[in-house]
Amino acid sequence: MGRPLRVTESGLVYHVLNRRVMRLPLFQKDADYLAFERVLSESLKHVAAPELLAWCLMPNHWHLVVRAGRRTNLSTWMQWVTVTHAHRWHAHTHTAGEGPLYQGRFKSFPVQEDGHFLTLCRYVEANARRAKLVKRAEAWRWGSLWVRRNRRSELAKWLRPWPVDRPRNWLADVNRPIDEQASQQVRQALDRGVPLGELRWIARISARLGLDITLRPRGRPRKDRQHSS
């Protein structure tokens, strides 16, 4: 299967993910997380940067939920983030020349601005709780849920309003498991870059962004066997 095009459409919400090569640790101490937050904060000063809506930094990967601006190109922005972070990481750990830090190019998919957006943000902000790094999602220092409640982060000033109203019981929602069907839909989007939303919206957005290839079944197409009589 070929790689889908990386078209960024202004106004669309995207989930963005990348992880350390071979799933090795990317962040091992507070200073590592803070260093990435500084890089991300610097990147958001650029005129072509997206709006930051939610995020979660995990020991070997990170999730970002962003909204593309009028001049945003996700590939250009992500290249700046990952290259800048990798250079600083290698300089700090004295590992320059020892190979790539990230597994490759980032993964991303667009998200419909309705309940699917809320489901995705629940999934992202509950990441550390699901991984059993904390008992309650809001206790994880390296994510938007904690920052929204405490405002003690370089990224706090970059948090933008959501396109969908956050439910009043959001904290309880994040700490409650997502139902299996919704969770499966998010995992498929993460794995294959399939847009996350209702079927008509997915078809429309996929055609517009050239993502139709992500909707095709994986593997080689089956060949009909010819039976001679």
Image (tube, grey):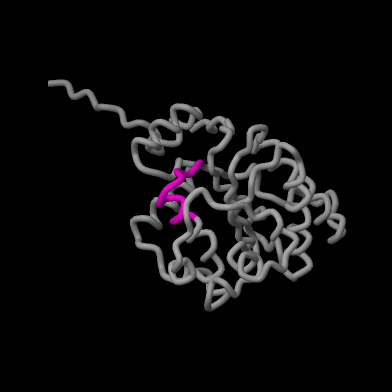
Count of residue discs: 0
- The spot of residue 40 in percent (x, y) is 73, 52
Which one is in front, 73 or 133? Answer: 73
Q: Which of 161 and 136 is in front in this view?
A: 161
Q: What stretch is highlighted in magenta?
A: 110-120
Farthest residue toward the top? 229
Residue 131 against residue 9 in the figure, above or below = below
> What is the x, y in percent for residue 146?
62, 69
Q: Is residue 35 left or right of residue 139?
A: right
> Which quadrant is home to the C terminus?
top left
User: In this orientation, which residue lies closer to the viewer: 51 or 88?
Assistant: 51
Residue 98 in picture, x, y percent from top left:
80, 52
What residue sits 63% from the left and 57% below the top? 61
Specify the quadrant of the image occupied by residue 226: top left
Q: Which residue lies furthest to the bottom in this view?
A: 135
Residue 146 lies within the magenta run = no
Task: Tell me what residue is drawn at x 76 percent, y 41 percent.
Answer: 46
7 relative to 145, above or below: above
* Residue pictured at 45% horizontal, 43% vertical: 112
Up/down of 50 relative to 94, above or below = above
Q: Which of 131 and 51 is in front in this view?
A: 51
Q: Residue at x 79, y 47 (%)?
A: 84
Instruction: Where is residue 177? Give x, y as percent.
Output: 41, 68
57 is higher (above) or lower (below) than 98: below
The stretch drawn in magenta includes residue 111: yes
